[in-house]
Image (cartoon, rainbow, N blue to C red):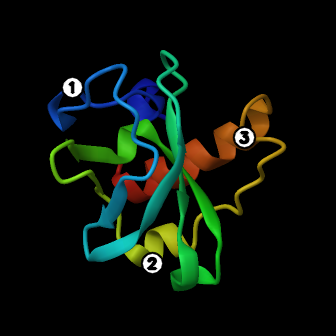
Amino acid sequence: MSENMWSYNPESHYTPGTSLVGFKVEASDGHIGKVDEATEEVGSSYIVVDTGPWIFGKEVLLPAGTVVRVDVKEEKVQVNLTKDQIKDSPEYDKDKHRGDAGYRTEVGNYYGRNMGI
């Protein structure tokens, strides 16, 4: 798994300190939901996306490395994944995502495989 999986890509135009909560999230093939939570911890950053009715209210954890563009003016986050890749991701576990290294490894490995990392 790439060390960059849990860090925002400098080319994404993400500026530290910018709150992404409430921003729309776009997959490579369309809208998937909105940001419910976002962090900017060095080497451990992620966004939690509320997919709303698209996946029956499911939330998904996306490592910051999946973010390819942040548009503050449009309040939009673009990720380099398809809807199916996101839909098939490991189930979001709000109790494990912060401190469980095994869970974060599972999520990172899943997205790393799908992103070719």
Q: In the rendered view, does 61 fall on the left or right side of 18?
A: right
Q: Earlier in the sequence, mark 3 or mark 2?
A: 2
Near mark 3 (Cα within 10 A), the count class, few <14, some 14-19 or many ≥20, is some
Badge 1 vs badge 2, beta-carbon distance below 8 Å: no
- Which type of secondary structure does the marked residue at label 2 adopt? helix
Q: Earlier in the sequence, mark 1 or mark 2?
A: 1
Q: Tell me residue 91's x, y (percent).
A: 71, 63
- Which type of secondary structure does the marked residue at label 3 adopt? loop
Q: Which one is in front in this view, the residue at disc 1 or the one at disc 2?
A: 1
Q: Tell me residue 15's x, y (percent).
A: 26, 24
Distance, label 3 to label 2, CA atoms, is 21 Å
Q: In the rendered view, does 51 fall on the left or right side of 67?
A: right
Q: Quadrant of residue 12?
A: top left
Distance, label 3 to label 1, CA atoms, is 24 Å
Residue 97 got which mark? 3
- Which type of secondary structure does the marked residue at label 1 adopt? helix
Q: Quadrant of residue 19?
A: top left
Residue 81 got which mark? none
Q: Tell me residue 67's x, y (percent).
A: 32, 45
> Can you identify the residue that label 2 sits on?
84
Inspect the image, locate mark 3, and give the three-letter code of the amino acid beneath it: His
> Can you identify the residue that label 1 sits on?
10
Residue farthest along the top direction in this orientation: 42
Q: In the rendered view, does 88 fall on the left or right side of 40?
A: right
Q: Quadrant of residue 72?
A: top left
Near mark 1 (Cα within 10 A), the count class, few <14, some 14-19 or many ≥20, is few
Q: Tell me residue 75's x, y (percent).
A: 26, 51
Inspect the image, locate mark 1, and give the three-letter code of the amino acid beneath it: Pro
